[in-house]
Structure formats: C-alpha cells, structure tokens
Amino acid sequence: MMVAVYHNEVENRKKMNQQVNNWFLSGHEWAVQQLSRAIANQRIGHAYLLTGPAHIGKTTFAKAFAMALNCESTLRPCGECRSCRLIAQDGHVDVTIVEADRVGGTLKIDQIRELQHMLALRPYEATYRVAILRRFQEANPATQNAILKTLEEPASSVILILTVEYIDQILPTILSRCQIINLRPLSSEQVYNALLSQFDTDPSTLELIARLSGGRIGWAIRTAHDPSQLEQRNVAIQQLSDILANKSRVERFKIAEFLSKDKDTLRIHLDYWITFWRDVMLLASGSSAEIINVDYSDRLKELARRLDYKTAHQALEHTRQATVQLGQNVNTRLAIEVLLLRYPAG
C-alpha cells in the first residue's frame, strides 16, 4: 500500500515538474526551452516577435514568458508566487498589455506614446517591465514607426513582446530588431489531451473540436467553453461553399456588400476560409497531411478534383492577404469584393 502511495506521489511530482518546465502551456516545448535557456544564461533579448495563426496561443505564451522573467521562485515560472499570480490575472503593475480597442480595430499612436512614457520608468516591483503588444498588425506604419525609438534604445529593464499572425504584416525595420519566435500549430492529439484535462465534456465532442482546431489551442479552449462557435464555423464554411457555387459577378458583389457590414464577423469567417482552402490545397496535392474540416471532407474532395493545386494555393493566399488588408484598415467592402472575384467557381 505504501509503495502505491509513494508511486502516486512520484508521478504527481513528475507531472507538476513537467508543467512547470513547460511554463504550464500546452505544446510549444521548443520555444519554452529556447527562452528558458536565455533566462538561465542571462542572455535575454530586449524585443521578441511571436508569430502564428489567430488563437494559437500567442498571448498566453507571452504572459507565461513574462511570468518566467519575473518569477520569485527558482523554478520559473512557479505559478504560485505573488508575481506569477498577478501576471496571470492581468494585474501586475510592471506588465502591460497594449492592443486595439477591438479585434480588427487600429492600434493608435497615442497608445504607443503612453506606453513609452511608462517604459521610461524603472520597474516598481519586478525585475523587468514587460510590454505585450497584441495583434501588432493592427498598428499602421506610423504607429509601428513610433515604437522604433524604444526598440533602438531599449532600457536594460524593459522587454517588448509583439504578437502578429504573419511576419509580412510588420515593417522590416521592426523585424530586424526583434528575435522572432514562430509558434506552430499543435497536433490534434496535443489539443485533445489539453481539452480532456480541462473540461468535463463528452470526449467525442472534444475530439471533434481538437480536429477542427487545426492545432490552435486558443480556439479549441474557447469553443469547448462555448460550443455555439461550431455553428458559426458551419455558417462560414457554408457561405464559402455558396460563393464558389455561384459564378455570377453580380451575386458575388451582393454577397460582398452583405459581408462587409460586420467587419468583426468577416474576420472570423476569413479565418475559417483559410482552413478550408488549406484542406483543398492538401487534397489537390495528394498530401497525406491531416485535413482540418473533417466533417466537410466530401465537399473538399469534390473541389480538390475540380481545382488544381495552384488554384487552391492562390485562393488561400488571396484570403490571407484579405485578412492582412483588414488589419490595415483598408476599405472593407472593396477588399472583400476583390477577394470574391478572385475566387474560382467550384
């Protein structure tokens, strides 16, 4: 009996150490190891750029990094000290998150100037002042240029962490001054195991969410909390299918007009369309990689037979470019009209 109890304690400690060693994150082990070594060797950069698809966990990773930088324990981050708890709750005076007022909004130059004033002060409590600039693609060129002075003349106690979806959304002058960490999608198994440990939900539902997530742990957790997002996804995919089935330019203009009325919903739909075109492209190329939209496999296979790889790849790139344009505050209706006219009939 005592042996069994001891064995359980050892296993629990192993799990706890594994969680601590991976900063309490699901996946991204290589990035955690890279930054953990930098902290241990005191070779911390002054600016980092986290890239990766929407909802892959960039902000969560950035906060975990801030915890590791300022943790009061030798096991960093411990998740239990005052500093870790405050950062996790977005309540630490020396850790600031700056973002546009809404997804698809614009990060304003006044926000950057206010941040710079704050960063000029020494940390109140922490070792480092950390500024997390979320969705920095929503900063126009003037706003991006405003942060250059901070990047060029960083204080020793300041760490900047920028997050973007695509690397080409950032000015080259910003890129050259940041250490780039490209967060990759998790495997569906990793996502499923993470969901299973957090939610008391039917495992088959969690398995479906994990497959549909495309490795985006943030989307998976959000959807497990609110399954109605699955219906929103179905609407988006069906909408795209209807667009492809309609060759009429007039009808596509009408659809573009309707979609452009709600920019926030449009951005969400474009994210789903990107996963759809990715699947068509994989099937058209004969790749053995796992498709995301498994419940639409028949429609995907039909399109893959009718469209070649090049056409599917172009549609994917056009969709991705449209998401970039929306982040740059271009005319929404014009951007979506151009996109729909570029789509093939299918």
Image (cartoon, grey):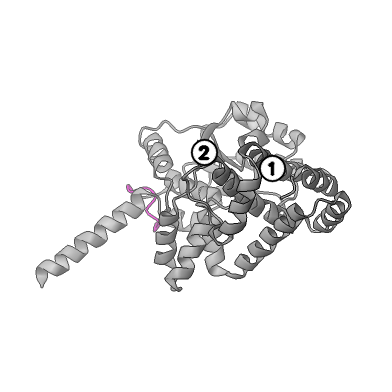
* 68 sits to left or right of 7: right
Residue at screen point 52% across, 46% down: 62
| Amino acid at pointer 2 | Asn
- Please name whichever residue, 77 or 247, is drawn nearer the observer in this view of the structure: 247
Residue at the spot of label 2: 182
x, y percent for residue 137 = 68, 41
Give coordinates of residue 91: x percent, y percent: 55, 57
Where is residue 3? Give x, y as percent. Answer: 10, 67
Residue 136 in which image quadrant: top right
Judged from the image, the secondary structure of the residue bearing numbered disc 2 is strand
Query: At numbered mark 1, what does the secondary structure look like: helix, strand or loop?
Result: helix
Nearest the eye: 153 or 63: 63
Q: Is residue 149 above or below residue 16?
A: above
Q: Amino acid at mark 1?
A: Ala
Left or right of 314? Residue 92 is left
Q: In front here: 29 or 230?
A: 230
Please report the bounds of the magenta region as a residue range: 74-81
Mark 1 crowd level (few <14, some 14–19, many ≥20, 10 Å Cα) = many
Residue 91 visible to the viewer = no
| Most foreground residue, 67 or 3 | 3
Q: Is residue 342 magenta?
A: no
Instruction: Verify whether residue 78 appears in magenta.
Output: yes
- Residue under numbered circle 1: 315
Q: Main secondary structure of the magenta part?
A: loop
At a point 43% along the width and 73% down the height, the residue shown is: 200
Q: Earlier in the sequence, mark 2 or mark 1?
A: 2
Residue 152: image quadrant is top right
Apparent side of residue 192 relative to residue 220 in the rendered image (left or right): left
